[in-house]
Amino acid sequence: MNLGIRYVILLVVTCCFVQCIYAKDMHFNSFESIRDRLFYHNCPIREDTLQIIKGVVTDESGAPLEFVSITLMTDTDSSINKVVSDTSGFFRLPKIKAGCYKLRFSFLGYQRKDTILCVSNAIHLSINLKQEGTALKSVSIIDRKPLIEKKEDRTIYNVDGRPAFVGKPILDVLRLVPRVNVSGYAIEIRGKGTATIMINDKPIYLDGKSLVDYLNLFKDNIVSIEVVPNPPARYDAEGEG
């Protein structure tokens, strides 16, 4: 019997549903090639200006993708800034110093895409993401919930049975969730700070490696992850209990 877990990141885990309640408030392309390294070190750079990177992210059919995580990174993969695309697939990264960067696009159920940019003027991008895929040995028609559900106080990511999440450690799963930042063993909500973790609406009073090790016990049973930016009062009461 598969017991569903919900995470509230708080993050809430339905065992397994992960809810993310802010504490108050796949195929991967190889990037470390010789060509890329040479590209970095030979970018023309103007150091006296600030520029903007903006663009639109779409799927293979040209439909806009909302909630795509766009991360501006150095050549050593250190994150500089992170934004999320809006309902029209649009994103905007302002006040970028001249230089060379990696721009990473990540979205649930889609292949991650890395782009090398040398910024000396404003840049407008059109990015197309491909869905994660596996070879089909048979075809089954399954009635299941949509990948993303938006409700009044939260966004729910239904990850059960999705190829992008199957068999992955919990931190790798959470890295795919928009607005959730993972650094070492720290789990944070972008713009909100450290996340409180709940499994099936019950708070987990652990942190750091102990928390991650505990959550990994349920990684094969995660049904959904909920991100709750402004948790209802009832979560405050439960958190104190």
Image (cartoon, grey):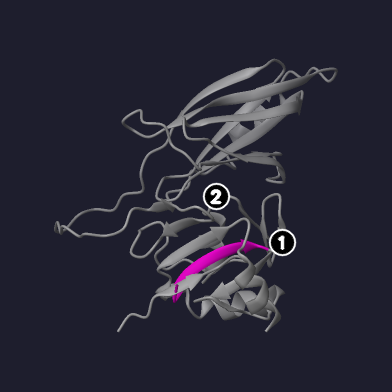
Residue 187 relative to residue 146: left or right: right
Q: Which residues are magenta?
A: 14-22
* Residue displayed at 68% across by 45% down: 77
> If the image is split into quadrants, where does the N terminus sit?
bottom left
- Residue 33 lies, in percent from the top left, at 57, 39
- Type of residue at label 1? Lys
- Dot 1: few (<14), some (14–19), or many (≥20) neighbours within 10 Å? some
Rendered view: 115 above or below 47: below
Give the residue number, with chain letter if any, for mark 2: 178
Q: Work out which quarter of the rendered image holds the C terminus and state it.
A: bottom right
SS at circle 2: loop
What residue sits right under mark 1 in the picture? 24
Count residues near mark 2 (Cα–Cα under 10 Å), then give few for <14, some for 14-19, many for 20+.
Answer: many
Judged from this view, the residue extending furthest toward the front is: 233
- Residue depicted at 48% across the width and 78% down the height: 218
Residue 175 placement (x, y as % from top left):
56, 56
Q: Are marks 2 and 1 in contact (CB under 8 Å)?
A: no
Q: Nearest to the eye among marks 2 and 1: give it.
A: 1
**Mark with earlier residue (2, 1):** 1
Q: Position of residue 156 (x, y in %)?
A: 46, 57
- Is residue 15 in the magenta section? yes
The quarter of the displayed image where residue 144 is located: bottom left
The residue shown at (60%, 42%) is 32
